Image (cartoon, rainbow, N blue to C red):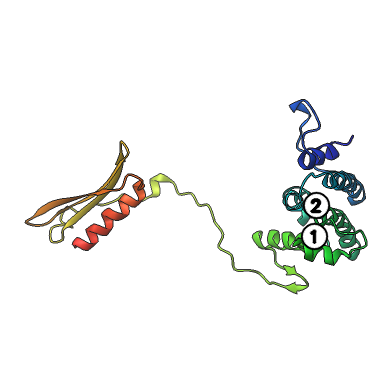
Amino acid sequence: MPKCTILLDYLLLGPLFTTISQIDIIFPTQNLSSFNVIIFNGVARLTIAKTRGGLSGRVLKALYRRVLERLLVFAVPAWWTDTVRQGTKITSIQRKALLAVTGAFRITSTVALQVSSGIEPIDLIGEKEKAMYLAKHRAPTISFLGVGLGNPNLDLFHETWQHPGSIPSVRWDRDSRRHTPAIYTDGSKLDGQVGAAFCFFGTDTSGEFQFRLQDHCSVYQAELVAIHQALQWK
């Protein structure tokens, strides 16, 4: 039995083997035609199990989205060309899963199966996955459903490194707080009890305030309360 068939049977129908060493991370290296046969065999067993009170349509739909759909669109930016022949093949594979999910007659059209099951056409999923990949990698030309999207303006993270020796040292002016009060806030959680506090130091006065919070509050909430109370006091 092919490894991919074993994986699909395990995910859809339960464990069919006895040792954990038989479980492997598998992706079908065959072409779409071979993968179509594998899906057909798995769906055929699902249909039989359903007539015997097995998996419901909702469970099959969830399994399809998390297993079969992810297998069908795996590495789709590398091989998806959006040709009619390619779309027809991948849709025929999806159709077999839709029949198992809906339990409809085999003469039902694929579009009707997609609408009644609430599952998007797999060719549109593949095109969407490819467009998202190109957008993330800032491709010069991006199209989706035949419409050019241009170059999207995305915020990207650019990692920069600066030598510690080139970072200017922080200069602390001792006279900077001579004419303005200094306020310090803090929030903590100790032994299941949460509290917040702030203290101030002015030119001729100083003081501190403490606040008790509910035990279910987090340290972050305590920090916010301390800052809020300090701002209200000021």
Residue 91: image location, x then y, percent: 86, 59
Q: Quadrant of residue 54?
A: top right
Relative depth, front residue between 96 and 219: 96
Mark number displayed over residue 72: 2
Relative depth, front residue between 22 and 174: 22
Q: Earlier in the sequence, mark 2 or mark 1?
A: 2
User: Which residue, as the protein is rendered here, is positioned at the far left?
Assistant: 204
Say few, some or many: other residues with alpha carbon within 10 Å of mark 2 (under 14 / 14 to 19 / 20 or more).
Answer: many
Mark 2: secondary structure? helix
Mark number displayed over residue 196: none
Residue type indicated by callout 1: Ile
Q: What quarter of the picture does the N terminus occupy?
A: top right
User: Which residue, as the protein is rendered here, is positioned at the far bottom?
Assistant: 147
Residue 212: image location, x then y, percent: 24, 48
Residue 97: image location, x then y, percent: 83, 53
Residue at image point 65% right, 59% down:
136
Residue at image point 29% right, 55% down:
225
Residue at image point 34% right, 46% down:
219
Residue at image point 54% right, 56% down:
157
Residue 62: image location, x then y, percent: 72, 51
Q: List the residue tagged with mark 1.
A: 122
Residue type indicated by callout 2: Leu
